[in-house]
Image (spheres, grey):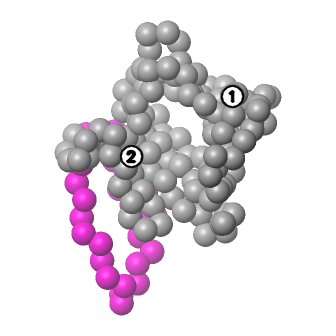
Amino acid sequence: MMLFAPLLLIAAAMGQATASAPKPDVVIWPHGVSPLGIKHKENFGNHGLSITVHDTSGIAEVHQATADVMIVQSGEATLVYGGEVIDAHSPSPNEVRGTGIRNGTSVHITAGDVIHFPAGMPHQWLLEPGKQITYLVVHVEEPTAAKP
């Protein structure tokens, strides 16, 4: 599937293993779905994978210590990013949530789009009633980002 070709580039960019470091097992998600189910999140040390399905608008969020790379598999939505999180609170270390984003940039996102959010970038999905968006997320720990 051409949609997952960017994953090869992402995997190569994250392959910082040295000759003496043990190599992790290969993990294959046939047709883009974890063998453990659509909601499963897989962690691999400095990065993780998950499939996310939204059928309603999401909350505003900021990940202070991880970057996100999203590969949209299906559907469409408006993505709002940047700006300031409204009613911001921190439910866990290095995570900020809120009800929306003020003064952000809005862009229409559809299947096949690939998005990179650096650590610290507010983002939120807005969906029209009856719409849905599904995407693969690669969460990458940023070594210079905030840590608890």
Percent of width and height locating residue 128: 53, 12
Does residue 29 appear to the left or right of 12 in the view shown? left
Image vertical order of residue 76 relative to residue 144, above or below: above
**What range is drawn magenta here?**
1-29
Amino acid type, residue under disc 2 in the picture: Ser
Specify the quadrant of the image occupied by residue 143.
bottom right
Residue most extreme to the bottom:
20
Does residue 38 appear to the left or right of 70 in the view shown? left
Q: Is residue 12 magenta?
A: yes
Point out the tag, 1 or 2, that comes first from the N-terminus. 2
Percent of width and height locating residue 146: 69, 63
Does residue 67 appear to the left or right of 21 in the view shown? right
What quarter of the picture does the N terminus occupy?
A: top left
Name the residue carrying label 2.
50
Q: Is residue 103 magenta?
A: no
Of 146 and 81, nearer the camera is: 146
Of 68 and 60, nearer the camera is: 60
Amino acid type, residue under disc 1 in the picture: Thr
Q: Are marks 1 and 2 in contact (CB under 8 Å)?
A: no
Percent of width and height locating residue 15: 41, 70
Answer few, some or many: residues within 10 Å of disc 1's Cα (few below 14, many 20 plus, some between 14 and 19). some
Does residue 44 appear to the left or right of 90 in the view shown? left
- Which secondary structure, mark 2? strand
What quarter of the picture does the C terminus occupy?
A: bottom right
Residue depicted at x 38% and y 64%: 44
Name the residue carrying label 1.
99
Image vertical order of residue 24 relative to residue 131, above or below: below
- Which secondary structure, mark 1? loop
User: Spatial distance from mark 1 to mark 2, Cα to Cα?
Assistant: 23 Å
Specify the quadrant of the image occupied by residue 103.
top right
